[in-house]
Amino acid sequence: MKAVTWQGRRDVRVEDVPDPRIEQPTDAVIRITSTGLCGSDLHLYEVLTPFMTPGDILGHEPMGVVEETGAQVTNLRSGDRVVVPFQISCGHCFMCSAGLMTQCETTQVTGEGMGAALFGYTRLYGAVPGAQAEYLRVPQAQFGPIKVPDGPPDDRFVYLSDVLPTAWQAVAYAAVPPGGTLAVLGLGPIGDMCCRIAQAQGVERVFGVDLVPERLARASRRGTAAYDLRVYEDEKELVQAIRDETGGRGPDAVIDAVGTEAHGSAAAKLAQTATGLLPRKLSAPLAERFSVDRLGALRMAIDLVRRGGTISLSGVYGGMADPMPMLTLFDKQIQLRMGQANVRRWTDSIMPYLMDGDPLGVDDFATHRLPLTDATRAYDMFQRKQDGAVKILMQP
């Protein structure tokens, strides 16, 4: 089959690889019909390269049709249309029963000290072959895949794999009080969807911050008060502008949808780049102990949120030596919630928004639809933020 493989820093290629097969009785094999390119994939493209191996298959946002199932998968049959969550979880362990599927005790990558295995996401999360491919082996298929009806195009449901539950959890963790305000930092796919979900749930005032014109325009068209970071003298001035709209206090909650690749912090960027250029035998141990993030977005969130407010982190961070402003966090009495989305915890709540009209605008959420064979161009375009690329879907 054809699959998108990682070959090195900023080097992904579509190659022929062996077809997946049933290996465990809880497996299924899915024929992919649509697969997303996620901002998290760009971390593998550049920042997290020490944890990758040439030939790794990328991708974790798939949907498709069931081709084959293992003996213990009784909830699916050949021909079912399904969306596959980005994490692999069993549904019955202590953590899954507590709604923490990203901590699944059946698939935890204990050898790396990490949580549940993820599709296509480094050896830290199990080095499981990913979903930017023609076919996908799905472990724990007795629980993970979400059956969806035939009829609507893939765009209606494919975001259940990651974008929708990640944004839903970010908004839930933000816990905006009735009549409260929310700021979203970063208006890429997750930040944009956070704004849409918050508004659909009745949050009347949502502020969005970015510096990419196409992202600001998308959010603004749907009622978000969009703030262009480039037009302010510095971040302090932008923070004050939003405070002025919230009684001088700041928003009740802030979602950081940016993560480790925030703009700014030249020293941290240099450290990330230098580590990625080292031979893997040297770079991986350094990254495990001394990795740092560009914390511009998180520091802005800490500055911006009102005292006693909540910061919800959905952007991916990977630093082990990040300097945190603990005095400010403590003094402002900030509540901090974070983590990979527990996909199946939220999908039943999200599904009505996909079945009754299109209030979240998923049908035209993708800015680009490309064949899987154009993956190399898709990654380059998305990484450079060219041609208005906000969300890219690929079809095998």
Image (cartoon, rainbow, N blue to C red):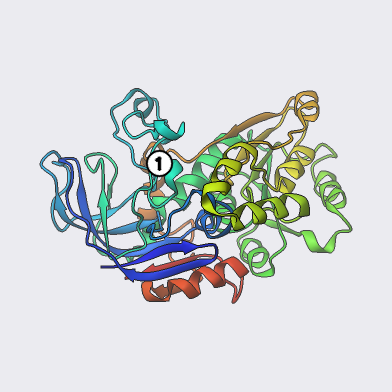
Among the 4 quarters of the image, the one containing residue 35: bottom left
Q: Position of residue 159 (x, y in %)?
A: 42, 55
Residue at the image position 61 percent from the left and 65 percent from the top: 218
Q: Residues within 10 Å of mark 1 (few under 14, many from 20)?
A: few
Circle 1 SS class:
helix
Q: Is residue 109 left or right of residue 254?
A: left
Among the 4 quarters of the image, the one containing residue 55: bottom left
Q: Position of residue 241 (x, y in %)?
A: 84, 50
Residue at the image position 59 percent from the left and 77 percent from the top: 387
Among the 4 quarters of the image, the one containing residue 293: top right
Circle 1: residue type: Ser
| Residue bearing mark 1 | 349
Q: Is residue 363 left or right of residue 382?
A: left
Residue at the image position 66 percent from the left and 67 percent from the top: 217
When the figure is inspected, residue 333 is found, relative to residue 220, above or below; the finding is: above
Q: Position of residue 153 (x, y in %)?
A: 33, 66
Q: Is residue 317 visible?
A: no
Image quadrant in which the N terminus is located = bottom left
Q: Is residue 166 left or right of residue 260?
A: left
Q: Position of residue 101 (x, y in %)?
A: 39, 34
When the figure is inspected, residue 294 is found, relative to residue 357, above or below; the finding is: above
When the figure is inspected, residue 88 is found, relative to residue 40, above or below; the finding is: above
Q: Is residue 238 visible?
A: yes
Image quadrant in which the C terminus is located = bottom left
